[in-house]
Image: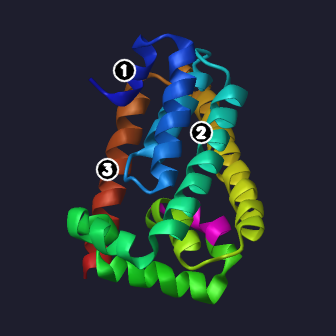
């Protein structure tokens, strides 16, 4: 069962709870598919199953709270926390990932928190790293809130409106045209991959 189908099978209120919790836990520093859950919920909003404003609001709240908790965990745990996490989750918290994220933080400071919301690795590491690097909390909080609003609200709005447009468009197309579009898309993707490899 796909995530979207599973979300569709649970009551509306639990969809909002799942979005807020998964995005919050991911922002806390635990690798979960927050963006996938948000996109799936936004697609359900495009179908009229849930309210897009509530989806975006829950994702924003989860992101802000999760990042803030992650900040305080990082502030308290410091580098030792990343060493332990690196041993447990080398794919997400390996020394190379943490060092790259630290370099970005040292170079960009509070902007790394804001723009980190849009990059999967930084989305997981932003809160704990900002705390471990002793970024002042008030500066972190401003970037955290603004980044969460733009990321969660923007993602929800884009997916919602694209979903509505796609549904209208698909309703007007014949099945033959749909097959032609899919085949063309697959062929284009294969061609682009071959070109990038060479």
Q: Is residue 41 left or right of residue 7?
A: right
Q: Pointer 1: what residue?
A: 6
Q: Can residue 170 be seen here?
A: no
Q: Pointer 3: what residue?
A: 186
Circle 2 or circle 3, nearest the eye: 2
**Residue drawn at 63 percent across, 28 percent down:** 164
Q: Is residue 97 left or right of residue 113?
A: left
**Residue drawn at 30 percent across, 66 percent down:** 85
Q: Main secondary structure of the magenta part?
A: helix
The location of residue 136, given as percent across then percent down, is: 71, 74
Which SS class for mark 2? helix
Q: Marks 3 and 1, how far apart in space?
A: 27 Å
Residue 162 falls in image quadrant: top right
Dot label at residue 188: none
The local crowd at label 3, few if under 14, some if 14 to 19, many if 20 or more residues have their Cα within 10 Å, is few
Quarter placement of the C terminus: bottom left
| Label 2 vs 3, first from the N-terminus | 2
Residue 152 falls in image quadrant: top right
In magenta, the rendered stretch is: 113-120
Which SS class for mark 3? helix
Q: Can residue 142 be seen here?
A: yes
Which SS class for mark 1? helix
Residue 56 falls in image quadrant: top right
Dot label at residue 159: 2
């Amino acid at each position: 069962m796909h995530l979207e189908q599973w979300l569709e099978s649970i009551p509306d209120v639990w969809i909002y709870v799942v979005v807020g919790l998964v995005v919050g836990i991911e922002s806390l520093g635990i690798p979960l598919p927050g963006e996938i859950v948000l996109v799936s919920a936004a697609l359900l909003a495009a179908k009229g199953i849930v309210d897009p404003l509530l989806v975006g609001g829950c994702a924003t709240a989860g992101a802000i709270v999760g990042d803030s908790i992650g900040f305080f965990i990082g502030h308290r745990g410091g580098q030792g926390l990343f060493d332990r996490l690196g041993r447990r989750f080398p794919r997400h918290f390996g020394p190379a990932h943490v060092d790259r994220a630290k370099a970005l933080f040292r170079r960009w400071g509070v902007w790394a928190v804001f723009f980190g919301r849009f990059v999967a690795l930084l989305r997981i590491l932003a809160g704990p790293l900002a705390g471990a690097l002793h970024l002042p909390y008030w500066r972190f909080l401003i970037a955290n809130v603004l980044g969460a609003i733009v990321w969660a609200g923007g993602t929800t709005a884009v997916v919602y409106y694209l979903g509505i447009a796609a549904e209208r468009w698909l309703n007007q197309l014949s099945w033959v045209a749909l097959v032609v579009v899919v085949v063309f898309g697959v062929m284009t993707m294969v061609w682009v991959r071959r070109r990038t490899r060479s």
